[in-house]
Image (tube, grey):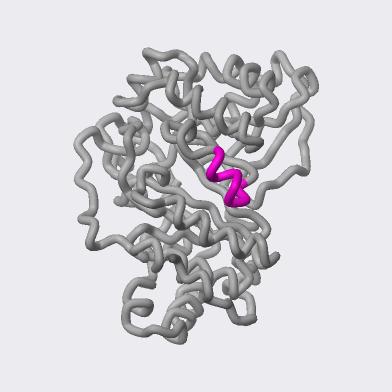
Amino acid sequence: MLLEDFKPLTRPPLVDPFGREISYLRISVTDRCDFRCVYCMSEDMTFLPKRDLLTLEEVDRVATAFVARGTRKLRITGGEPLVRRDIMNLFRSLSRHLASGALDELTLTTNGSQLERYASELAACGVRRVNVSLDTLDPDKFRKITRWGDLDKVLRGIEAARAAGLRVKINAVALKDVNEDEIEGLMSWAHGLGMDLTLIEVMPLGEIEPGRIDQFLPLSIVRARLMDKYTLDDDPYRTGGPARYVRVRETGGLVGFITPMTHNFCESCNRVRLTCTGTLYMCLGQEDAADLRAPIRASGDDTLLYRAMDEAITRKPKGHDFVIDRRRARPAVGRHMSVTGG
């Protein structure tokens, strides 16, 4: 039972120093993953001890506090969120905020490996769309990128999600000399199945074996290549995240571009990220963070938690400082993306 009787109070919204209302919380429920993608993790990762993680009840409590302060969208991430034990208990509990109208959307980002198992349950909890991270349709290349992944299992998961009525969006990281020749094919495949595609520039988060300067492919180049063959019309569609979309006339589908390196999206940032340990990052590209685990474990009511949230949002920066070049061999941020949440 996850705080099913908890009733959020009506409280003032969280607004940062630049007047941006915080309406979107991304929650990493685990740093663990059943893949080891080359742009995200080292092959030999050391994961957090389970005792350091928030319980699912504590995750629910923090999420509920944010909903009470104006958060309208919750995205569950990881690592791979669906490998967390009893994760569906959290979705079932958080779905009460959809039922009450306090929350507009409950969704998740997944690698797709567990979707075949959980798609129907997610739909029953009020999840209406999912983002699936998929960088290639070539089985051998997929195995090289993910190190451990099985493409057929992911494709079955995508089909299960579509069969359950979930809207699927494909997220692909653009990788120089790895999948840049496949982006057109990935787009055509996704659009042919009624799925949108979002392309993402690799970000300088965490130490990994390949150098990110060798992985980095500017999406300005990708977009220019697509424009050689397709008609791309700017589209006002927004999901609450940083992607900016175009509609491809020839396919009818959307392509989103997330460009933290070549054109950052900070001016309208309405997001904060909670890690599985209860650390709140006000910016993906900054190290400054707030501890929310201590206040929730110090008191049975949420006075200390709200105070910590308020103080944290006063420190939300205007933007990040991502840079990738050969003069900066170290990542801009030391933590891996799997720790922060995708």
Quadrant where the N terminus sits is: bottom left
Q: Position of residue 57 (x, y in %)?
A: 40, 66
Give the number of callouts.
0
Tell me if 64 is positioned left or right of 46 in this view: right
Q: Kindly give the residue lying farthest to the front in the view shown.
A: 1
Which residue lies at the image location 39% right of the left edge and 16% below the top edge?
141
Which residue lies at the image location 71% right of the left edge and 14% below the top edge?
229
Tell me if 23 is positioned left or right of 342 in this view: right
| Range shown magenta | 120-127
Q: Is residue 67 shown to the viewer in this render? A: yes
Tell me if 167 is positioned left or right of 53 in this view: right
On screen, residue 103 above or below 312: above
Q: Is residue 242 shown to the viewer in this render? A: no
Q: Is residue 272 magenta?
A: no
Which residue lies at the image location 38% right of the left edge and 58% below the top edge?
275
On screen, residue 243 above or below 250: below
Q: Position of residue 239 (x, y in %)?
A: 67, 47
Foreground pick, 122 / 40: 122
Which residue lies at the image location 57% right of the left edge and 19% below the top edge?
186
- Prevailing SS of the magenta stretch: helix
User: Which quarter of the figure has residue 103?
Assistant: bottom right
Foreground pick, 302 / 21: 302
Q: Position of residue 27 (x, y in %)?
A: 46, 56
Q: Is residue 126 magenta?
A: yes
Foreground pick, 227 / 30: 30
